[in-house]
Amino acid sequence: MVTIRLSRGGSKKNPFYQIVVADIRAKRDGRYIERIGFFNPLARGGEVSLRVDRQRADYWIACGAQPTDRVKQLLKQAAREQAATTVVAA
């Protein structure tokens, strides 16, 4: 089974997460199929805290990939942010 989950990077007490599509048997920070975005929980100032390729996420979900609970929240947050920027631009 394939899952969409977070892979931790960064340094001690300074986390940075990649949003990846991986086989469920792979280690958390191990081999993955595709990287579809990132999440920086400690972003400050003008730094981007979340970036997700929604088209690729939707593709993998349509193929049967199961996002983790945290990734589901991040996908919803990305959709809200994208909708807000679309309204402002229009």
Image: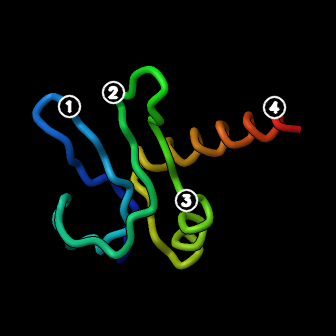
Residue 88: x, y in percent? Answer: 81, 31
Residue indicated by mark 2? 42
Q: Amino acid at mark 2?
A: Leu
Is 90 placed left or right of 67 in the picture?
right
> What mark, if any, has residue 53 been given in the picture?
3
Q: CA distance from mark 2 to mark 4?
A: 26 Å
Q: Is residue 59 or residue 40 the one in the foreground?
A: 40
Q: Quadrant of the C terminus?
A: top right
Q: CA distance from mark 4 to mark 1?
A: 32 Å
- Residue at the outermost front position: 46
SS state under label 2:
loop
4 or 3: tag closer to the N-terminus: 3
Residue indicated by mark 1? 14
Q: Is residue 19 above or below residue 76?
A: below
1 or 2: tag closer to the N-terminus: 1
The answer to which image quadrant residue 49 occupies is top left
Write the residue at 23% across / 48% down.
8
> What mark, if any, has residue 88 been given in the picture?
4
Is 52 placed left or right of 9 in the picture?
right
